[in-house]
Image: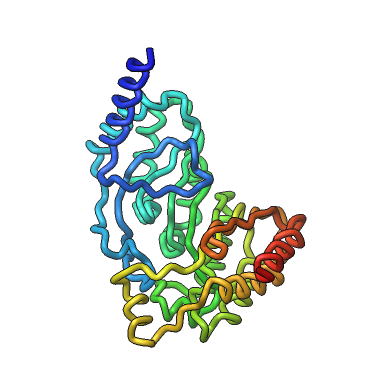
């Protein structure tokens, strides 16, 4: 029985692997359990100085590839209710293309009722209010967006390709279309020079939005990225883990959001701090104080 189960598991794993073009699959923690459909790979922007994805070739999957993956997913997750479109910013695809994929997905897996994917703010801004509403009507429920900072100097410094106003505008459009969003920020992204401004302006921007979740990921200098090269030349001063935690304390102190889950899985490189705002804000700040005391 054990041998049979092991063989079945191996066959299932091989079948699952066949629908992805790379070994590493990137999906947010909150999408655990979602059916994963690769509709693109890489990032259409690929210019952020801190990002390791800039080396990946940007490609859009054709409908034949998508059709094969959906047929396979029907075998693996026939009762899935939610599907996550893979690709570093799958929302850059045209509304027509996204609707076509959603329609095919629901044909193969009728139980599907919700879709989500990664997006950049400029992907949102390129779509009209009518398009956003149409996508919601067809099942788009959430977008995962890396805003990284609320400070324009920092956003420009890392070549994010948008401003704080753009971020606020894009998220406001999603609010009006009833499309939820999960936001990622990067403590430490401003380096030592802009640490306080990065924290305060990011909190100020977040307080004007309505995210379901904020995921804080401390800056990591990936080898061969432009930001790592700037650090090697002394043009960017990275912060130590405890300095990033001090910055995060400023951020949390200034957050006034309600009914938002806050999570940092990179605290001092080995801890997780998480809680719902505003009820658990005090507890998270106390946890930060305890870690700083170490």
As rendered, which of 277 and 92 lies closer to the eye?
277
Left/right of residue 118 with respect to residue 254 in the rendered view: left
As rendered, which of 241 and 185 lies closer to the eye?
241
> Which corner quadrant of the image does residue 244 belong to?
bottom right
Give the quarter of the figure containing the N terminus. top left
Q: Position of residue 139 (x, y in %)?
A: 49, 39
Left/right of residue 272 with respect to residue 48 in the rendered view: right
Q: Position of residue 126 (x, y in %)?
A: 41, 61
Q: Position of residue 235 (x, y in %)?
A: 38, 87
**Residue drawn 26% across the image and 50% down it:** 60
> Which corner quadrant of the image does residue 198 belong to?
bottom right
Find the residue positioned furthest to the top: 1
Q: Is residue 247 above or below residue 135?
A: below
Q: Is residue 228 above or below residue 39?
A: below
> Which corner quadrant of the image does residue 109 belong to?
top left
**Residue drawn 54% across the image and 78% down it:** 151
Find the residue positioned furthest to the front: 294
**Residue drawn 67% across the image and 67% down it:** 252
Left/right of residue 57 with respect to residue 285 in the rendered view: left
Q: Is residue 69 above or below residue 222?
A: above
Q: Position of residue 227 (x, y in %)?
A: 37, 76
Left/right of residue 209 with respect to residue 285 in the rendered view: left
Examine the rendering and report whether any part of residue 170 can be seen.
Answer: no
């Amino acid at each position: 029985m054990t041998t049979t189960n092991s063989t079945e598991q191996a066959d299932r794993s091989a079948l699952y692997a066949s629908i992805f073009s790379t070994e590493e699959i990137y999906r947010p923690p909150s999408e655990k359990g979602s059916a994963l459909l690769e509709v693109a790979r890489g990032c259409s922007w690929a210019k952020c100085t801190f990002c390791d994805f800039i080396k990946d070739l940007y490609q859009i999957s054709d409908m034949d590839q998508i059709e094969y993956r959906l047929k396979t997913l029907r075998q693996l997750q026939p009762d899935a209710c939610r599907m996550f479109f893979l690709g570093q910013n799958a929302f850059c695809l045209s509304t027509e293309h996204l609707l076509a994929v959603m329609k095919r997905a629901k044909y193969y897996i009728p139980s599907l009722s919700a879709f989500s994917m990664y997006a950049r703010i400029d992907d949102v801004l390129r779509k009209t209010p009518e398009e956003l509403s149409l996508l919601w009507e067809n099942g788009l429920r959430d977008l995962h967006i890396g805003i990284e900072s609320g400070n324009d100097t920092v956003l420009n410094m890392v070549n994010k390709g948008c401003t704080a106003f753009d971020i606020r505008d894009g998220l406001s459009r999603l609010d009006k279309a009833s499309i939820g969003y999960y936001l990622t920020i990067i403590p430490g992204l401003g380096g030592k020079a802009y640490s306080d401004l990065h924290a305060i302006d990011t909190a100020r921007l977040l307080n004007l939005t309505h995210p379901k979740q904020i995921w804080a990921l401390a800056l990591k200098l990936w080898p061969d990225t432009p930001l790592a090269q700037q650090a090697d030349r002394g043009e960017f001063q990275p912060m130590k883990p405890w300095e990033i935690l001090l910055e995060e304390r400023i951020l949390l102190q200034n957050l006034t959001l309600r009914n938002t889950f806050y999570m940092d899985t990179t605290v001092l490189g080995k801890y997780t701090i998480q809680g719902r705002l505003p009820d658990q804000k005090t507890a998270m700040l106390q946890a930060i104080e305890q870690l700083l005391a170490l």
